[in-house]
Amino acid sequence: MNRRKFLHDSLIGAVGFSTLNSSFVQGCLVPRSKTRLGVALVGLGYYSTDLLAPALQLTEHCYLAGIVTGTPEKAERWMQRHKIPEKNVYNYQNFDTIANNPDIDVIYIVLPPSMHAEYVIKAARAGKHVWCEKPMAMTAVECQQMITACEQNKVKLSIGYRMQHEPNTQTIIGFGKTKPYGAIQKVAASAGYRDGRTNHWKQQKSMGGGATYDMGVYCINATRYTTGLEPISVLATQSTDRPDIYTEVDETMQFELEFPNGIQAVCETSFGKGMNNLQVDCANGWYKLAPFQSYSGIDGITSDGKLLNAKVNNQQARQMDDDALAIMHNKNVLVPGLEGMMDVKVVEAIHRSVREGKRMGI
């Protein structure tokens, strides 16, 4: 046997072995023996540290396998706390080498919005499935680039809208289809909190700060999933009670969305005050969730007294398990990139409306 034939036969054998013991998941070879997917968190701020990492201890279909951070001290703490092997720890300089690590199946982007497009595209090119926090990106153009990169590399892209995985929210999404209280006429949504920080990336325009990008997308997404429709125009006004802090981005945004069939949505989002309500008024009644996007649970009621109070042990764990199952069974993810892009289109139209002082088409 000459060297060329040996290499050829060895390659065929390796491919045959891999095919017997693996399955293709939208272009990625995932071992059939894997019952849980390895997730690498990119960016180790509050959301990763206090919410996603603990949630990954509760998931059934995925687990914390690796991290990406630019801070060596954080890397050491995470390795010790979560028993992460050093070979699964990356920084932003060697990020691309994650492509060679079979322990990592999914890369979860938990960075400021200005960095989402770059690292989603890098993750896709590394051949890894991608989960990305909201807002999806700074512009709809970036969103489309992210979607295209994932499609070209045959990996799945899911946006971290945990509410669409939550059972009470899913109930009112169902109401929008079955219309038990008649045709929807008006939606009111508000989402905000008092942010006491004065020098954070959420107050910086270049990083994707501002209440609308951060909290307003909850309202936008809620109006879209309750009606099952896409808004056609928006009128918005911006204000601040702390102009010394909010010099670049919006502290508070009020906006009215116009939908087909005459449906109106009135929304408010803020870093200056706490708000957490979603109400849908229909021809023959109403239903609401209050709070509608709280980490600790969602509660609601209908005009005829039905309680919407199904409980979930951990919202982030449910979201990640749902997405992991979609990957393993090669099914559509619940919240694909298109969902994130449609919300970012509305955010851009809101800011255009503020700049031009008039209603803008979307």
Image (spheres, grey):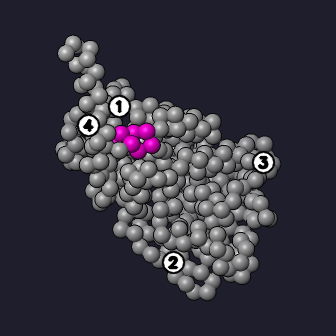
Q: Is any part of residue 14 visible from this angle?
A: yes
Work out which quarter of the rendered image holds the N terminus and state it: top left
Q: Nearer the viewer, residue 248 or 254?
A: 254
Q: Find residue 127 and report its horizontal and vertical position in percent.
A: 41, 34
The Cα–Cα distance between marks 1 and 2, rounded to whole angstroms, is 43 Å
Whether residue 142 appears in magenta in the rendering, the answer is no
Element type where label 3 sits in the image: strand
Q: Residue at x 52, y 34 (%)?
A: 152
Q: Which residue is mark 1?
A: 99
Q: Residue at x 57, y 86 (%)?
A: 305
Earlier residue among tags 4 and 2: 4
The Cα–Cα distance between marks 3 and 1, rounded to whole angstroms, is 43 Å
Say which of marks 4 and 2 sits in front. Answer: 4
Q: Amino acid at mark 3?
A: Met
The numbered mark at residue 17 is: 4
**How many numbered circles does the render carry?**
4
Element type where label 1 sits in the image: helix
The Cα–Cα distance between marks 3 and 4, rounded to whole angstroms, is 57 Å
Q: Nearer the viewer, residue 221 or 234?
A: 221
The Cα–Cα distance between marks 4 and 2, rounded to whole angstroms, is 50 Å
Element type where label 4 sits in the image: helix
Q: Which residue is mark 2?
A: 308
Magenta range: 24-30
Q: Which residue is mark 3?
A: 360
